[in-house]
Image (cartoon, grey):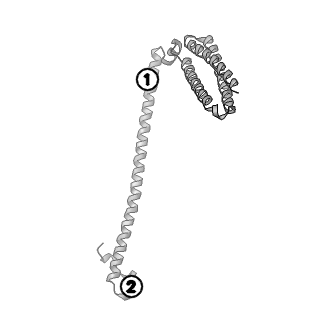
Amino acid sequence: MSSDFEAYEQDFGTITAEITNKIGKIPKLSGEEKTQLVLNVDKQLEEVRELLEQMDLEVREIPIQSRAMYNSRLKSYKQEMEKLEKDFKRSRIAYSDEVRNELLGDDASSSESQRAHLLDNTEKLERSSRRLEAGYQIAVETVFRDRFTHLSWGGLHSQFRRKRRQVTAMAPAPYLCNMTTVNLTSLDM
């Protein structure tokens, strides 16, 4: 089992060395030559992914006592693969003159167009911010009004209960049955 893993390791080393070499060449190329090399590297990266899957399957078949060592090696290969993929992405968009001109633009009209576009977007952002602030203000006022109304009714209710206790305390026993005849407005609220 471990001999298969070691064979995969050799293949991994060979292919990754080729990929590293090609990744270094990509930024220096342009046009069709660059496209072909990118496609070639992409295929080789797929081969490496498949090798890593095979290695993972082999590690699962290895006896438990020696599995930890192979797992750590596999983990380092996966990290190397991640680094290769990052390097590949960077090399594809390297600072070649063609890409730089495409990103930055050479003519002044492009700059003016970008400036006008930026100003338009800034104005839209400011209008949206004002609308959000107005909406927030309305929400705060609504919540405050609702809470104030709730508190006001709660306060009136508690005042009514206090006055009712006062009236019942002051009223003679025969009038306790007929509370509606007591004039609440005569009491100090």
Mark 2 — residue?
Answer: 176
Query: Mark 2 is on which residue type?
Result: Leu
Residue at figure coordinates x 59%, y 29% from the top left: 72
Q: Nearer the viewer, residue 161 or 47?
A: 47
Q: Nearer the viewer, mark 2 or mark 1?
A: 2
Question: Where does the image place residue 189, in percent across and percent down from the top left?
Answer: 30, 72
Q: Residue furthest left?
A: 188
Q: Secondary structure at mark 1?
A: helix
User: Where is residue 22, by image quadrant?
Assistant: top right
Instruction: Give coordinates of residue 150: x percent, y percent.
Output: 40, 62
Q: Which residue is mark 1?
A: 115
In the image, is residue 126 above or below residue 112? below
Q: Name the side, left or right, on which 20 lies relative to 106.
A: right
Q: Amino acid at mark 1?
A: Arg
Q: Residue at x 69, y 29 (%)?
A: 58
Could you tell me how far apart the alpha carbons at marks 2 and 1 are, in whole angstroms?
Answer: 83 Å
Q: 36 or 153: nearer the eye?
A: 36
Q: Sequence order check: which comes first, mark 2 or mark 1?
A: 1
